[in-house]
Amino acid sequence: MHLSTDSVSGPEGFGWWGDMVSRAVMPVSLASAHADHFEGEVALLELVDTEFSAFSFSPMSARRTPDHIRSSDPENYYLFLVHGSPIGLEQRRNNALLRAGDVALFDTSQPLACEFQDQGRHSRVSVLRLPRAAVPLPSDKTDHLVATPLPTRTGSGALLTSYLAGLRENAEHCGPTELRRLRTMALELAVTFLAARLDSAPTLPIESRRRVLLARIHAFIDHNLHEPDLGPATIAAHHHISVRLLHALFEEEPETVSATIRHRRLERSRTDLVDPRLRHRTIGEIADRWGFRHPAAFSRTFREAYGISPTEARTAPHAEQPCTPRRGPGHRSPAQ
């Protein structure tokens, strides 16, 4: 869902933005030197019991007071990734100046102050809501992470930021089943990231550790679809597990490892084929972009999945495209 101040007249835009933030995130008080000509837009992605949001707006400041909390506390953590101008954040006596590429956490149950610095351009942030009840970590320890820069250059931090940066683009064409999986991956990657900051990974339940590993594997697959050699052996080696364990992890998934890779490559290829902005790319270039080495094999696999050739998909009248191709080899029925 896309919302924008373009839908309201000039001076009313700032009031509209404040109401929207109070409903979509939490009640706060806003102030801005740009209130008379405030501009803002947000893309909201529902991920089943949570949301991912991408905000862009004129510089402003936000305050959440004890009165706001008493009035309404959704009891959420929020992880946010900074894309634009620096952001000053204060909560629980912690202070942080966050720059582009930084990630931080805040809590709706504690007062906070947030300053989106004015550097002549819009502030831009991506935000992932984490219900407190869905975070299986000691809350007294997690609370100490708020308003502190969280390292993202390596390990789970690098994986999480890469996943959040591409989440909106990769999810906008998917249906409920795919969104549930994306939601699980987002939450598990976030929990893994926070647990590493607390050195609490050993305290996670066994099932949570399994889901965390599976979420990391799914994210790795998504970010390496362009590699022709991506397969079970490569994935297992990267995650320091055996191929046998990898296949065991996928036993309760809708598809095998190889079928998952093929499925997602086909999805990305079909999306590119019907994208008018990519008309200048040949079918062979699109196939190669998503890891299909041989154009003839790609055409055959595409037809088996969708019932039409890549050329027919590109030239057919535009219609809403399904996110999931026909069931192919490696697909498991619910009874399996």
Image: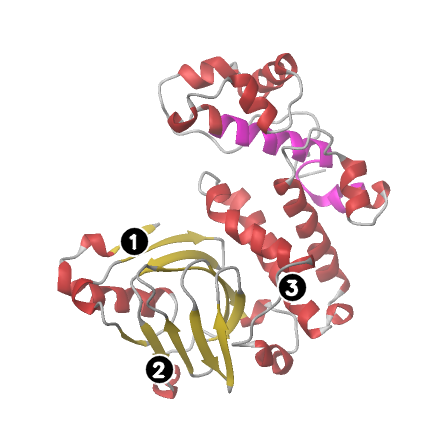
Q: CA distance from mark 1 to mark 3?
A: 30 Å
Q: CA distance from mark 3 to mark 2?
A: 29 Å
Does 94 lie within the magenta span?
Answer: no
Which residue corresponds to mark 2? 68
Q: Nearer the viewer, mark 1 or mark 3?
A: 3
Q: Are marks 1 and 3 in contact (CB under 8 Å)?
A: no
- Residue in the foreground of this view, choosing between 75 and 221: 221
- Residue in the foreground of this view, choosing between 87 and 187: 87
Q: Estimate the x, y position of residue 314 in percent, counting from the top left.
A: 44, 18
SS label for mark 2: helix
Answer yes or no: is residue 50 visible.
Answer: yes
Q: Residues within 10 Å of mark 3 (few under 14, many from 20)?
A: many
Q: Estimate the x, y position of residue 275 in percent, counting from the top left.
A: 41, 28
SS label for mark 1: strand
* Main secondary-structure element of the magenta-colored stretch: helix
Q: Nearer the viewer, mark 3 or mark 2?
A: 3
Vertical relation: 11 (above or below) 232: below
Give the image's coloring scheme: secondary structure
Q: CA distance from mark 2 to mark 1?
A: 24 Å
Q: Earlier in the sequence, mark 2 or mark 1?
A: 1
Q: Which amino acid lies under the numbered mark 1 shown in the image of this protein?
A: Leu
The magenta segment is: 247-271
Q: Which amino acid lies under the numbered mark 3 shown in the image of this protein?
A: Phe
Q: Estimate the x, y position of residue 148 in percent, counting from the top left.
A: 55, 75
Please report the residue visible at 51 percent of the width from the left and 76 percent of the height from the top.
Answer: 147
Q: Which amino acid lies under the numbered mark 2 shown in the image of this protein?
A: His
Which residue corresponds to mark 3? 193
Q: Estimate the x, y position of residue 27 in percent, counting from the top left.
A: 34, 75
Which residue corresponds to mark 1? 3
Please report the residue visible at 23 percent of the width from the left and 57 percent of the height from the top.
Answer: 5
SS label for mark 3: helix
